[in-house]
Amino acid sequence: MTDIPEIIVSQEKFDEMIKELEHLKTVRRTEIAKSLEYARSLGDLSENAEYQEARDLQAATEERIKKLEDLVKHTKIMQDGKKKDEISFGSKVSIKKEGSSDIHEYTIVGSEEADMRVKKISHVSPLGAALMGKKKGDVFTFETPSGKQVYSIEKVA
């Protein structure tokens, strides 16, 4: 068994993982089996690029299935019992850096869902961890590669 710590995700992300797992186990495995069967029919397997490609794809798919099964087994769905004014999982937060007028908005999520392209930050990232439990109006600092940064919380939703 893989040593995976408990992972916290939203119900939406959990449903995505289950859907991907089912797709890989049913549709994708069937497609790969057909590819392998076709490649075998071409003859000499030692010099058969199609066969080797299908075997590589099969190995990658089985590895992804195992990873998803481990993730699902160790996943806890974040509870929506958060306090309205306190930052926790699922909170949408607006923050402002000291000395700047720019406001940055983020959503606090589990590490499996973090994606800076859509402004979703993990609760265990330096910024996410610094935000957890804070309230509107709080000033906080956190460590970055360029030193300590000071921010204020403008809005919590």
Image: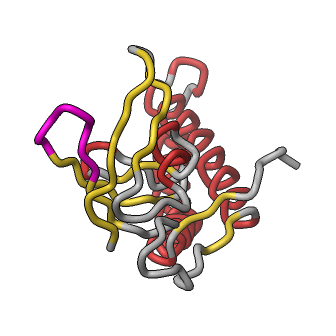
In the rendered structure, does residue 97 fall within the stretch colored magenta?
yes
Q: Nearer the viewer, residue 62 or 132?
A: 132
- Residue 156 in the image: state x and y as whole percent: 34, 68
Q: Relative to 85, does residue 63 appear above or below in the rendering?
A: above
Q: Nearer the viewer, residue 141 or 37?
A: 141
Q: Nearer the viewer, residue 66 or 135?
A: 135
User: Residue 144 occupies which quadrant of the picture?
Assistant: top left
Q: Residue at x 68, y 65 (%)?
A: 75
Q: Relative to 43, does residue 104 appear above or below in the rendering?
A: below
**Coloration mode:** secondary structure
Farthest residue to the bottom: give it.
81
Q: Nearer the viewer, residue 47 or 117?
A: 117
Q: Kindly report the secondary structure that dominates the magenta region of the rendered protein.
A: loop
User: Residue 108 occupies which quadrant of the picture?
Assistant: bottom left
Q: Which residues are magenta?
A: 95-102
Q: Relative to 130, does residue 9 appear above or below in the rendering?
A: below
Farthest residue to the top: give it.
146
Farthest residue to the left: give it.
101
Q: Residue at x 56, y 26 (%)?
A: 44
- Residue 6 in the image: state x and y as whole percent: 74, 58
Q: Is residue 19 visible?
A: yes
- Residue 10 in the image: state x and y as whole percent: 50, 71
Q: Residue at x 26, y 35 (%)?
A: 98
Q: Relative to 112, does residue 135 appear above or below in the rendering?
A: below
Q: Residue at x 33, y 65 (%)?
A: 92
Q: Is residue 31 left or right of residue 3?
A: left
Q: Is residue 39 left or right of residue 154?
A: right
